[in-house]
Image: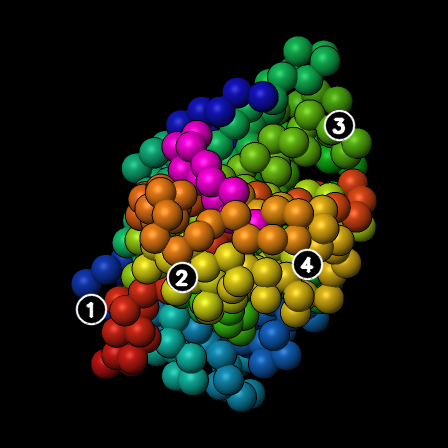
Amino acid sequence: MNTIDGGVTTPKGFKATGTHCGIKKERLDLAMIYSERPAIAACAYTQNKMRAAPIELMIQRHSDKLQAFIINSGNANAITGPQGMKDAIAMSEMAAKALSLDPVHVGVASTGVIGRFLPMDKMVPGIESIAAQLGSGREYDHRANMAILTTDKTIKEAACQVTLKDGTVVTIAGMAKGSGMISPSMKTKHATTLSFVTSDAVLTKAPEWKWQECINKSFNMINVDGDQSTNDISVFMANGAAGGKPVDDNPEYWNGVLYVLQSLAKQVVLDGEGATKLIELKVTGAKNDREARTTGRWIISSSLVKTAIFGADPNFGRVLAALGNSGSEFDIDKLKLTIGSNGDEVVLFEGGVPQVKPCSETEVKARRLLSDHNISMHLELGVGNGQAEAWGCDLTYEYVKINAEYTT
């Protein structure tokens, strides 16, 4: 696998763009992704029972082939009743008409303020015109990515290439948005974080199991604020334009997909609303991988852990209290908690006893390490071989300010 500079149009046969249709005052607010041929697809959706209309529509259709996606920002079209579903259907149908496609092959996603109806008088001309603006290349990648942002400060992209045994080079690329209301728990068939991964590899069937596995190890292991969105969706589209042998069971290919997803997930956390620090937590020695993931998510979701990291406070008690609430098994006599940054580290707890005394040199060093922007934590549970990684960010004063004023 080789990492490359690229976006959703880097794989062969994909086009995209973003435009301004008027949902927002000035920023781009409407994006489209298009494949020149039908693509094998898999989607993972929020498990929030208050699902937005576009999510309900996608679940009802459950199409394993997609050729385009229409996405708006600035308005979530969530908790909008029957009108919301009518508007989501209209978005799909209008985009399908503009591209001469069957609506069932055109996906829909929305993100933004909850509880407001889409301004369809503005969206209709936008959707009708965006199809004529499609193109390939970095400018088009960036325009599409910019158009799906809400409180995000930066675009989020990742790409890589995998050379198959027959010499075929296949490309995997993606874009994402997400800054607040981030605690995904997405499942196939069943953010807001929106993520779209495109590939020109050949698949013979919808990779729902593989996609779920990759989501479980990426977006389902991040947390900004503990609130799962009504609009979370993660989409995979592979159109086969690169040719070569099918990659359904190719581990190197799926490692490439996982790389793209994890890169996008980390970028979402780094751009968390008001965030100043990235927390990377590795859990080892768990009963199994499932419990390791549960432990990781629970700890990086803890508001007390997040605020301690923000204040550079080496309060190991908050981490261990979160572990105790996670339901996961551990052996306290074999438990070990380490924090670090830039290759340097400090053991906070080991062998059932604290390793940091108040006002000691070790505590001073721990506070210094926690003052960095990239914080690593390693928690050994001592009961098995399960392991997982999770990513989160600190909880700051700025987060409260942003969300206290969100609709104003």
Report the front residue among 186 and 401.
401
**Disc 4 from disc 1: Cα separation:** 41 Å
**Disc 3 from disc 4: Cα separation:** 28 Å
| Left or right of residue 178: residue 317 | right
Q: Quadrant of the N terminus?
A: top right
State the residue position of label 1: 25
Extent of the magenta region: 339-349
Residue 151 shows up from this direction: no
Residue at the spot 42% in from the left edge and 79% down from the top edge: 114
State the residue position of label 3: 250
**Disc 2 from disc 4: Cα separation:** 21 Å
Q: Earlier in the sequence, mark 2 or mark 3?
A: 3
Q: Position of residue 58 (x, y in %)?
A: 63, 66
State the residue position of label 2: 308
Question: Is there a contact, CB below 8 Å, between mark 2 and mark 3?
Answer: no
| Amino acid type for the residue under numbered disc 3 | Asn
Main SS category, magenta section: strand
Q: Position of residue 27 (x, y in %)?
A: 23, 60
Label 4 Cα neighbours within 10 Å, binned few <14 / some 14-19 / many ≥20: some
Is label 2 in a helix, a strand or a loop? helix
Question: Is there a contact, CB below 8 Å, between mark 2 and mark 4?
Answer: no
Q: Earlier in the sequence, mark 1 or mark 3?
A: 1
Q: Earlier in the sequence, mark 2 or mark 1?
A: 1
